[in-house]
Amino acid sequence: MTLIRRSISASTPYTAAIVMAAAIIAGGCNRHAEPAAVAGTGDTPVAAVQQLVKDLRGNDLVAYAEHALPPKLHQDVAMAWSEGRTTWPLSELPLSEQLPGFIVTLAEPDAEKTLLAAFHRQFFRADRELRTAASTLGLFAAQYVEHSNNYSDAEREHYVQLIVALSTWGSNAPLSDPALAKAAVPQLVAAARLTGLGQAGALRQAGMERSLTRLGPFLARLKTVLDTYGLDIDGALDGAQIRLIEQTGDTAQVSLAYTLAGETIDAQIMLERREGRWYLSNLLRHAQEQAATPSPLATPAGPDALSKPLRH
């Protein structure tokens, strides 16, 4: 377990991949959907998911949040964010509790020097150890998802496939390459500092819209870095295939197939229609649950529990 924790906290590119890639893929689908399905944003199940992918392709997290939820629920989530009760849609990410601290760590003074020193100390020429860590972390993550009550059957099946793909990538990616690390770390450090979210509690203080606006460029830089390690997120989205399986009244099911890191993933996504527009059911459910979460001010964790920095 020590090796797994060390890999999560200190291996910047690998952490970033697990934290960010799953949500980008799981929340999106094919940009090249059927022409009849793109007449209006959310007018059909296919068009609704297509719009989310368009937002993610443009690294527009503000638009993603707006298109993912009906207006009233979006307002409720924004209020919950300002009160420290959620960081949705960031909470859709695997290991989402690590993300605020990940940015804090990157934005710290001398972060570039500290992280590169940690890399050389812990990962230089540690190819076999990193491969083992990636495989072990993937195994534990898959087991957690399979036995967790937090996911629907469709989500569980999708995420397990996704974890396997990321674990396989991590087992083969050049994570111990010092030249790649030397190029990647400064990029991520600079991008994190530009967010202005490099302090504990910054997400809550900035609010949902401002935080997501600032995180857009960080996501763009993160994609670029991951691509140098062989994880092409936008390429996976570009090659995705989507088709409508069935639509009955205000519910629908679509099939989403894509290739990530050489692994083919085939998932089924449920959608529902509200106020004449289509939304992903799992995003609605998670947002509703988090908008109703009690204030952390009433718990020992305190309002900054969502923004604890990573400790090496």
Image (cartoon, rainbow, N blue to C red):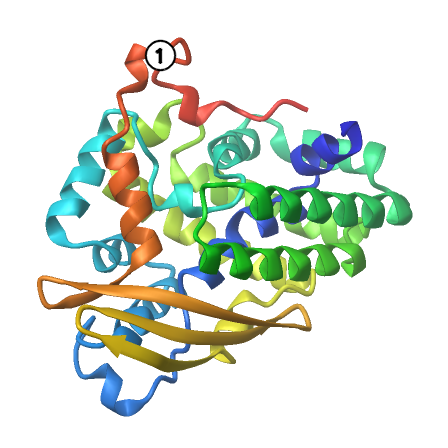
Measured from the top left, where is residue 135 in percent x and y?
Answer: 78, 50
Q: Is residue 33 visible?
A: yes
Nearest the viewer among 246 and 213 is 246
259 horizontally vs 31: left or right: right
Measured from the top left, where is residue 310 in percent x and y?
Answer: 58, 26
Label 1 packing within 10 angstroms: few (<14), some (14-19), many (20+)? few
Q: Is residue 113 visible?
A: no
Residue occupying the point 46% across, 33% down:
100
Q: Secondary structure at mark 1?
A: loop
12 horizontally vs 240: left or right: right
Residue 82 lies in quadrant: top left
Nearest the viewer among 139 and 304 is 139
Residue occupying the point 41% across, 53% down:
217
156 horizontally vs 56: left or right: right
Query: Residue 221, relative to residue 205: is it above or below?
Result: below
Nearest the viewer among 293 and 124 is 293
Which residue appears farthest toward the top when viewing the image? Answer: 300
Residue occupied by mark 1: 299
At label 1, the amino acid type is: Thr
Measured from the top left, where is residue 203 in percent x and y?
Answer: 34, 31
Residue 180 lies in quadrant: bottom right
Nearest the viewer among 204 and 182 is 204
Task: Count up the numbered dots.
Answer: 1
Measured from the top left, where is residue 191 in percent x and y?
Answer: 49, 45
Image quadrant where one finds the N terminus: top right
Residue occupying the point 23% across, 32% down:
292
Image quadrant where one finds the C terminus: top right
Residue occupying the point 48% across, 40% down:
192
